[in-house]
Image (tube, grey):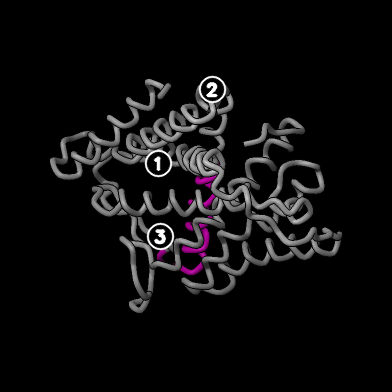
Amino acid sequence: MFRRYGIFGLILILLVELNFIFKIQPLANWYFPIIWFGYILVVDALIYRLKKNSLISNRLGLFFGILVLSAFFWWIYEYYDMGTSFFYSSAGYWTYHNLGVFGSTLIRNIFGTLSFATAVPAVFETAELLKTVHLFDSVELKKKHRISKTFLHVMVLLGITCLVIPFVIKNVYLGQIMWLGFFFFLDPFNYTHHRPSIISHLKDKKLVIPLALFFGGIVCGFFWEFWNYWAIPRWSYTMPPLTGIKIFEMPLLGYICYGFFAWSLYAMYHSVGTILHGKTEKI
């Protein structure tokens, strides 16, 4: 059975797509949370249709918790970007346009929070769909790898470096290592606390979760850029003139960052769960 909320999600996506042309207000201004909640509902319904179990249908409380964490995580990135731009008295790595349509800072922040709340569930649901269709089941490492304390310490050091360098060197390309920072810094923490982590799969050789997350992030990245391109409130990137081929606002190679972003979200989710509850439910 295809869940009814999936049909509702399809309707939301269709209405927003049409409204990119007609721009009926206030729907045109609030397109982002509307279309992304529609996307999440559709993907979750597909997952349920395939395996009779899904996040919304079977773990609704966890789903709402992830919405809250998602908004929190992206606000971290927002303040991180604002921090680097303030440090250099220049524009951040991304810039928002036409936010004046919301009239007040309060409404703008509500829009932002609702929008940011969709990031993690969108990535996790997309990764789960890729896992459900068994796309990466046969992909494994050729041999197991030992994870030493030195390896973990180097990862943490790399994470700190990735998070600090954008404050030290203002370079739009070098600054993209920020998308690796939280993954390198937090994934070893999850591993040492026996929580789900990306690096744990170096030992079991299974690459289903790392690849599903990575490509799930890229899929979401494509749709983020696709739906952003024709929107009224939208974003663009602070890029030098020569950035190579672009797909919508994002240079082609930039989509790889969405894969690392997905790994970072995974690490952040399990780290926060471990700190707050001592455990997290696997996603």
| Mark 3 crowdedness (10 Å alpha carbons): few <14, some 14-19, many ≥20 | some
Please name the residue that numbered disc 2 is placed on: 60
Q: Amino acid at mark 2?
A: Leu
**Nearer-the-camera pick, 11 or 187:** 11
Q: Does any portion of residue 184 appear in the rendered image?
A: yes
In the picture, the disc for residue 94 is 3
Residue 119 higher or lower than 1, as above or below:
below
The mark nearer the N terminus, 1 or 2, is 2
Mark 2 or 3, closer to the camera: 2
SS at mark 3? strand
Task: Specify the quadrant that holds the C terminus.
Answer: top right
Q: Is residue 115 above or below residue 143?
A: above
Q: Position of residue 110 (x, y in %)?
A: 39, 35
Name the residue: 56% across, 48% down.
Answer: 212
Q: Nearer the viewer, residue 191 or 272?
A: 191
Which residue is depicted at the point 19% across and 39% down? 19
Count neighbours of disc 2 (C-alpha within 10 A) and say few if under 14, some if 14 to 19, many if 20 or more.
few
Residue 278: in magenta span? no
Above or below: residue 85 compared with residue 64: below
Q: Furthest residue to the bottom?
A: 242
Residue toward you, 266 or 236: 266
> Which SS does the magenta portion mostly show?
helix
Q: CA distance from mark 1 to mark 2?
A: 23 Å
Type of amino acid under label 3? Trp
Instruction: Name the mark on residue 112.
Output: 1
Q: Which mark is residue 262?
A: none
Tag nearer the camera, 1 or 2: 2
What's the distance in space between the residues labelled 1 and 3, CA to CA?
A: 14 Å
Q: Quadrant of residue 92?
A: bottom left
Residue 72 magenta-highlighted? yes
